[in-house]
Amino acid sequence: MTELTTDAVTQTVEAHRERRAFTFFPTLWQDLRYAIRSLRRHPGFTVTALSTLGVAIGLNTSLATLASSLLWQPWAVPDPAAVVQIYKTSAAPPRDDGDRRHGEGSMEVLLADYQSLEHAKLTDIFATNCGRDLRMENCEVQLDAERTLASFVSGNYFSTLQIPVAYGRAILPPDNDVNAPRGVAVVSHGLWQRRFASDPDIVGREITIDALPFTVIGVTGPEFAGPAHLARDVWVPMATGGLLRPSVRSEIWVEMGGRLRHGVTRGQAEGELQSIFQPADGRPTRLHLVGTSSFARPNDWRELYAGLSVMFAGV
């Protein structure tokens, strides 16, 4: 009796499912026809709804495209897969004393840290800053009558990143001599067109940066304006930071990166750098090599996540 009852229930359920499947498409068609008739009767509402949907979809698509191009793309340099960002974290147990240089967070990379790695064999190391600091406002300079953004770079910055120079030459190690820094500058292709009207005799021309004389030695190619979203219009030797920013802190912070030599993996390069690294502050430190997108470093992701979430939610 129980088996018969079970079979009857199963048959009833299956029959119900078949009827629902059979009526789904006719019901859907009826709903669509009703919706279309309703929209026809209220053209104002229809236009408003469709416009709102179109604008929202367009804004989300634009924001996603912009975020992808700015935040997930590697730097626009030749062979970007071989280029890495280098940062350091504390290898000591975290301390709950408010010092953000301890624990899992990134530690500030000092100029002395970079100098201890300059002679690595597996990676060509370069550095950049905003003139003895990393604060964005310190990247702003007064170039003649225009405010623009500058990078203070190591002498091997252009050669390591293989940045094309359309006119003149790039900054070289002799320009970055801390004992006798040269007041030279490389300008972006965009600035050359906008500010100097594509002057073919720009190389050798004297400009003023924060009221100090600099000589233009080169113009970058049109395809390069800085790594990723960090667009710049002028590059000067890092050693000139002491001239342009004499009042800024004496402990110089830098952003450090490198290009892996042919056939070298990130693991091999990281192992070598760790073995020769001499922390300027003497604290146990671990080095990390990551890609060049804006989300490559964990701290970058945490800092940008909140802002991106608000933007996407608002749109």
Image (cartoon, helix red, strand yellow):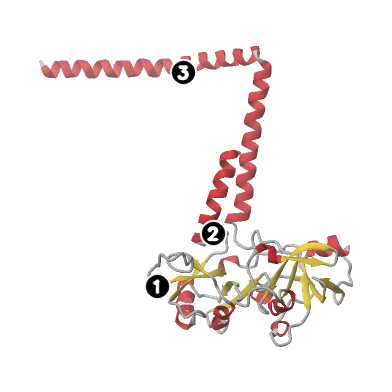
Q: Is residue 278 left or right of residue 175?
A: left
Disc 1 marks which amino acid?
Ala
* Earlier sequence position, callout 2 versus callout 3: 3
* Earlier sequence position, callout 1 versus callout 2: 1
Question: Which quarter of the rendering shows the C terminus?
Answer: top right
From the top left corner, tell me how far across and down residue 248 is, in percent: 67, 73
From the top left corner, tell me how far across and down residue 91 is, in percent: 41, 72
From the top left corner, tell me how far across and down residue 203 is, in percent: 85, 75
Neighbour tally class for label 3: few under 14, some 14-19, many 20 plus, Cα within 10 Å = few
* Earlier sequence position, callout 1 versus callout 3: 3
Disc 2 marks which amino acid?
Asp
Please tell me which residue is depicted at 60% across the width and 77% down the height of the picture. Answer: 251
Please tell me which residue is depicted at 43% across the width and 65% down the height of the picture. Answer: 104
Q: Are marks 1 and 2 in contact (CB under 8 Å)?
A: no
Neighbour tally class for label 2: few under 14, some 14-19, many 20 plus, Cα within 10 Å = few
Q: Is residue 98 above or below residue 53?
A: below
Residue under circle 3?
25
Quarter of the rendering containing residue 253: bottom right
Which label sits on residue 243? none
Please tell me which residue is depicted at 49% across the width and 76% down the height of the picture. Answer: 269
Please tell me which residue is depicted at 45% across the width and 81% down the height of the picture. Answer: 275
Residue under circle 1?
92
Q: Is residue 100 above or below residue 271?
A: above
Residue under circle 2?
300
Q: Secondary structure at mark 3?
A: helix
Disc 3 marks which amino acid?
Phe
